Image (spheres, helix red, strand yellow):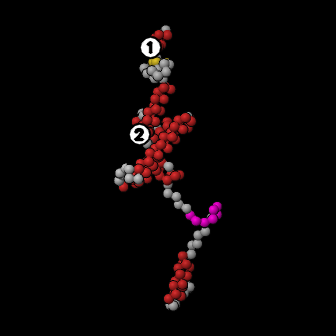
């Protein structure tokens, strides 16, 4: 088969000029780069990995996670996009707080919810329990004894007879 016949069966990539699969207009590398670029565009627009992947023609989220794991430059870009998304929400809330933007109660609530979901380290509600650091928290489980003691103290203040520490069980 002549070289000319082979070139007719194989396509030439419109982006890099290399030969590609029969009937294709882009080689696999350039097609992947185009898909990645579409994902980045849609992720910036929608802020959702799944929705952006769908619009970019990516069938599985796993593809995005594989790119993040295997390509440091893409992983860095993805983290930057996530940070930008959070910054945009913070800016809108700030503008609303300063009276520069009119947001309804539900819009503010939704924005706060998104911040908590997108950046839980910074925005999630934190609960802290007392106690000594790195020591177990002591809990006293003697409700009956505490209640009887409380009744005795109340009785002592009012001058009435105590509850009696003995029970009629």
The x, y position of residue 49, in whole percent, is 45, 41
Q: Tag 1: Cα neighbours inside 10 Å, few (<14), some, or many (≥20)?
A: few
Q: Earlier in the sequence, mark 2 or mark 1?
A: 1
Whether residue 168 is visible to the viewer of this picture, yes or no, is no
SS at mark 1? Answer: helix
Q: In the picture shown, does residue 20 fall above or below 39?
A: above
Discs 2/1, front = 2
**Above-or-below relation of 114 to 139:** above
> What residue did someone put label 2 on?
45
* CB atoms of marks 2 and 1 within 8 Å: no
Q: Is any atom of residue 46 visible in this view?
A: yes
Q: CA distance from mark 2 to mark 1?
A: 39 Å
Q: Main secondary structure of the magenta part?
A: loop
Q: Element at badge 2?
A: helix
Direction top: furthest residue: 2
Q: Residue at x 64, y 61 (%)?
A: 134
Task: Find out whether residue 56 is within the magenta segment.
Answer: no
Rendered location of residue 147, percent (x, y): 53, 79
Q: Residue at x 47, y 46 (%)?
A: 86
Q: State the residue in front, 33 or 95.
A: 95
Q: Position of residue 163 (x, y in %)?
A: 52, 86
Name the one closer to the observer, 104 or 79. 104
**Left-right relation of 56 to 126:** left
Q: Residue furthest right?
A: 135
Name the residue beneath numbered marker 1.
8
Note whether 12 is above or below 60 in the view shown: above
Tell me the residue at 51%/91% (across/down).
159
Which residues lie in the magenta part? 129-135
- The local crowd at label 2, few if under 14, some if 14 to 19, many if 20 or more residues have their Cα within 10 Å, is few
Residue in front for this viewpoint, 91 or 99: 99
Look at 55% across and 78% down and name the residue there: 146
Front residue (pair 154, 24): 154
């Amino acid at each position: 088969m002549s070289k000319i016949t082979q070139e007719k069966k194989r396509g030439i990539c419109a982006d890099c000029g290399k030969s590609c699969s029969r009937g294709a207009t882009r080689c696999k590398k350039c097609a992947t780069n185009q898909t990645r670029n579409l994902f980045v565009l849609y992720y910036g627009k929608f802020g959702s990995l799944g929705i952006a992947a769908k619009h970019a023609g990516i069938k599985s989220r796993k593809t995005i996670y594989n790119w993040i794991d295997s390509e440091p430059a893409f992983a860095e870009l993805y983290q930057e996009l996530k940070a930008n998304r959070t910054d945009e929400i913070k800016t809108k809330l700030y503008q609303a707080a300063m009276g520069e933007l009119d947001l309804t109660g539900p819009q503010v609530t939704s924005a706060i919810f998104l911040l908590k979901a997108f950046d839980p380290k910074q925005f999630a509600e934190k609960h802290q329990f007392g106690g000594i650091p790195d020591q177990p928290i002591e809990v006293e489980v003697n409700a009956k004894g505490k209640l009887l003691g409380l009744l005795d103290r109340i009785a002592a203040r009012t001058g009435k007879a105590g509850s009696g520490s003995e029970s009629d069980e």
